[in-house]
Image (spheres, helix red, strand yellow):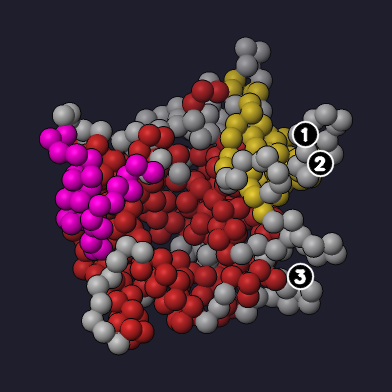
Amino acid sequence: PDVVEQFLGILSCELKPRADNDYKEMLDMKTSGSGNECVLQAWDVPYYTFCARQAKFQLKASDYAPYFSLGCCMDGLNEIFCALYGVYLETEDVKAGEVWHADVVKLAVKEQEGGNLLGHIYCDFFERQEKPNQDCHFTIQGGRVQPDGSYQLPVVVLMLNLASAPWGSPPLLSPSSLDNLFHEMGHAMHSMLARTRYQHVTGTRCATDLAEVPSILMEYFSSDPRVVSTFARHYQTGEPMPYAMALSLRQMRYHFAASETQLQVFYALLDQRYHAHHPLGKSTTELLADLQGQHYGVPYVPNTAWQLRFGHLVGYGAKYYAYLMSRAVAAWTWHELFREDPFCRTAGEQYRRELLSHGGAKPAHQLVSDFLSKEVTPESLASVLIADIDAGLN
């Protein structure tokens, strides 16, 4: 807990001036629209974030969608995996009764050299009645060494909730859907490429601090214009996405990144405080108001208690900070290995060999320190996350 508090405390201090600049931009928009002096309220943030991005980038999700057909996006993932890891995705026919819906696609993950099978991913892409409305990855069978020395291959599911396409058109993804596809495929490849002795520590079955690293790292690829330009094609004309348009994906990713990260720090600190020493000494709402005043740039709204519907407090149970920690390690990995060349095989093989292959079989702190050849501390993690935000804004 002390290390987590230190990490979050450093982030909070470093983010404040950067987040204040974000809130000033939003407040200026609100003031110019009303003509009066205003206060930025909690409900203003999502609205003016959307308005400011629209005004700055002059692009809507519907402008990107024609370039992001599902087929093109899957081709893009295949190109990345071939380049980095020397593996490829191949569609396989399914047997009668093998899948739970006709829309499910079975993918084999194979080595380019020799064609060895590494595992299977069942892709359940489309929304339908009674299907859970969430994007996720989950394991059907974990990889492990069997008694005869052979390896039990992993089997996982990648689930999205894409809208079904009209007849005669391919499914088209928005930028956020593209991010979700790449994110969940990051989890799936963690499962595919791990090679552990026991299945209860394979792939994503690792420390919570590490579990989101492969998935968040893939979001860097989905917003890098050098990567997007290799696969984004208009589904009707075949024209590649203009480079300036692809570049705007990266720019939008970092627009208001400081204020959005500050909100995550506030959530994580609240989660820590609620699960710390008891009795708390105050009501959960009083604690929320105190922490919001200290760590978030938008004031608490009196007589509200939104913590009562913050489900992560139960599901994560003092581990909400892990998203930020994973994000820091993913940023570190991107800048150390892939920023100069997102298709570098040497970097990809190092990442596969020294991080992905271990799953949860090696302590997370040791795993990351050995992988990056650097000491992992609250200061270094916070520093790299702040540096990533600053780099994205320049």
Mark count: 3
106 drawn magenta: no
Disc 1 to disc 2: CB gap under 8 Å: yes
Q: Which residue is mark 1?
A: 99
In the rendered image, residue 250, in percent from the top left (x then y), is placed at 48, 69
**Residue farthest toward the top in the current orientation of the protein:** 147
In the rendered image, residue 227, in percent from the top left (x then y), is placed at 59, 65
Asked whether residue 5 is in view, the answer is no
Q: Residues within 10 Å of mark 2 (few under 14, many from 20)?
A: few
Range shown magenta: 280-309
Disc 3 to disc 1: CB gap under 8 Å: no
Residue sitting at 26 percent across and 58 percent down? 301
The residue closer to the viewer here, 339 or 384, is: 384
The mark nearer the N terminus, 3 or 1, is 1
Q: Residues within 10 Å of mark 1 (few under 14, many from 20)?
A: some
SS for tag 1? Answer: loop
Q: Which residue is mark 2?
A: 102
